[in-house]
Amino acid sequence: MIEREVIVTNRAGLHTRPASMIVRLASQFRSEFFIQKDDYEINGKSIIGVMTLAAEQGATLILQFDGVDEEAAAEALALLFEDGFGEVK
Amino acid sequence: MVKGIAVSPGIAIGPAYLYARVSFDVEKRSIDSKLLKNELVRFEDAVRRSERDLKKIISITREKLGENSVTIFEAQMLMLRDQSLYPEVVSCIENSRVNAGFAVQSVMTKHRRMMEASGSEYLRERANDLLDIQDRIIRHLRRGRILSSVDENSIVASENLTAADIILFSRRGILGCVTDFGGPTSHVSIMARALHVPAIVSTHGITNEVKSGDILILDGITGEVIVNPDEETLAHYVNKRERYSRLVQEDKALVPLPAETLDGHHVGLQANLELREELVQLAEYGAEGIGLYRTEMALLMEGRALVTETEQFSQYLEVVQAASPAATTFRILDLGGDKMLPMGNREHNPFLGWRGIRIMLDKMELLVPQLRAMLRASAFGPVRILLPMVSSIREVRSFRAIMDKTMEELAAEGVAFDPKVPMGVMVEVPSVALAADQFARETDFFSIGTNDLTQYVLAVDRGNDLVAHLYDEMHPAVLQLIQMTTKAAKAAGIPVSLCGELATNMRAIPVLLGLGVETFSASPIYLPGMKRVIRAMKLSEGQALAKKALIASDPAEFRAVMDKWLEEHACGVSFFLDGKHSA
């Protein structure tokens, strides 16, 4: 299992479009994927889950991957966060 | 005949299809353990069909409205096979041994409740998406195929429709749609116009009047719906439909031509918009900028009162860039009146109550972020700011002071904006028209809102059937106020435009130009037709007609004058002004 800490950098936070992007990207990997925010943990492959995080700009999240392709999954998802989902920062 | 509000022009004739868009309440049934497998197959099948619906919706939306508009539907698509929802429904069917419909309903309801109970307005709004897919799956479970029963050549009659419904229907090639509820600026009306589907809303009960299979005529120009017409009426509308489609073809040729009278006076034709989905229409219909950008819709769609400055800025930026080099006129949030108040206040007389600028001057937490977002957008293209529901000069001064202070703050933060952003007022309360010379000295432009101006001058609520016949936007008293406004504007050297429904009324256009209106702003789809009238007249003729209109004591008589004039001048558009009786 590996963990990555990321920060939500795009201004609008994890609203519908970024949430969809996360779920779609994560679903391409076989590893299990969870996101932790404060004391809260959700399944990162569930759009309902990611939406209920309601993470705003500046929020710190822990991404947790477990499975055969965890390295690649962590790399890809971390990059998506860094990139601010292609939105205005 | 049933009358509603025409929101997307065109004539549709065909059989009615009654579409029930109500949330189903599914009964709980126990399932024999031998049949559980069958129930799981039914569930998977309904999910697959729902995916197919959404795929179509997404592809049409992308094609017609652009990439930005598909987000919501893509999220709904992901919800269908959500890793927490889907397995939960499956285990509910298996463990509780219940029918698939009931399992879908109870699992989704549980999640929806959680989202609704959260403090976040955003999540409460997303709960509606969940309800949308719950309905979709259950409808598929119930009737196997729902949409395939909407016949290609039918007219959909429904209590209400969502944007997704109308997108899918247009793909099925329906002829038109008519609803009990909704307004001209509701999302479904905007979609209908974008997709060129004739539509009438707010009929107050069309679904009680028709059965599936009844023949319907929708007149998307006058808002009339005729149920099971006689042969003569049918023939009339078949003819009207042909002539209308010819007219639309001819109108297309007008788009690149200037809006100029025969004696060489240029008339500004601008767009009334409220969603970014509509921005493509600026070029499609030849609008010279945005005369009225309503900010309520984007806010209500987000489902919360306080859209952040950043979110507003990114919306406004997109709008300004689409309209540039022409100007965008942003109207400050106009809540109250008939528009829902997010604060949940109820008033006895909302049209005379807390609305428009009155709310905003009391609610700095709403006004300041919006104003900052508008000013920031002004760094990227010409912006004008318009104040709604102003009744006294004090409000203008208060607003000006806030705007000056906001500009100072932005400058101190090093944020770019245009320090000369014009500030104008809506002329919709009669006091502004009556004291127009005073207002003209302290504002940079006027925008006449004829709908509210008429209701305030005549003291008529046109939504009230008992008095609606007294509502007349061409009443001499209304026209006089318009003239006072244009005169004051001219004397002070400030621009004046008119953005009410009256601008799209062919009978009114010559009169309004004669009264001194320089610019019209309307839903883009109407602009080519307006241009047709403008290009067929001389300003001097408009002035002569205006003189008559200002003293016309009988509205019917004056309508006849205008009909005759239009028949002679404007290539037969008068045929389209009314229903059967004016033909």
Image (cartoon, coloured by chain):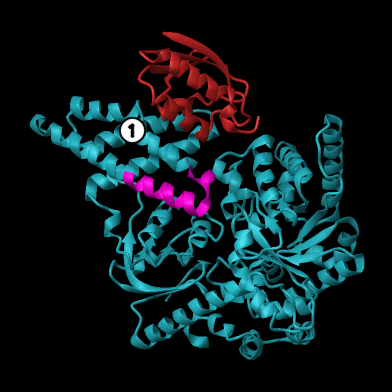
Report how many numbered discs are placed on residues in the image. 1
Rendered position, B333 above or below B216: above
> What residue is rendered at 80% in x and 56% in y?
B424
Q: Which residues are magenta?
A: B52-70
Of the chain colours in the picture, the one used for chain A is red
x and y percentages locating residue B226 in the rendered image? 40, 76
Residue closer to the observer: A72 or B300: A72
> What residue is rendered at 58% in x and 75% in y?
B251
Of the chain colours in the picture, the one used for chain B is cyan
Q: Secondary structure at mark 1?
A: loop
- Residue that mark 1 sits on: B81
Which image quarter is the N terminus of chain B in?
bottom left
**Magenta span contains residue B69:** yes
Residue closer to the observer: B468 or B142: B142
Residue closer to the observer: B49 or B215: B49
* Chain under disc 1: B
Rendered position, B179 above or below B131: below
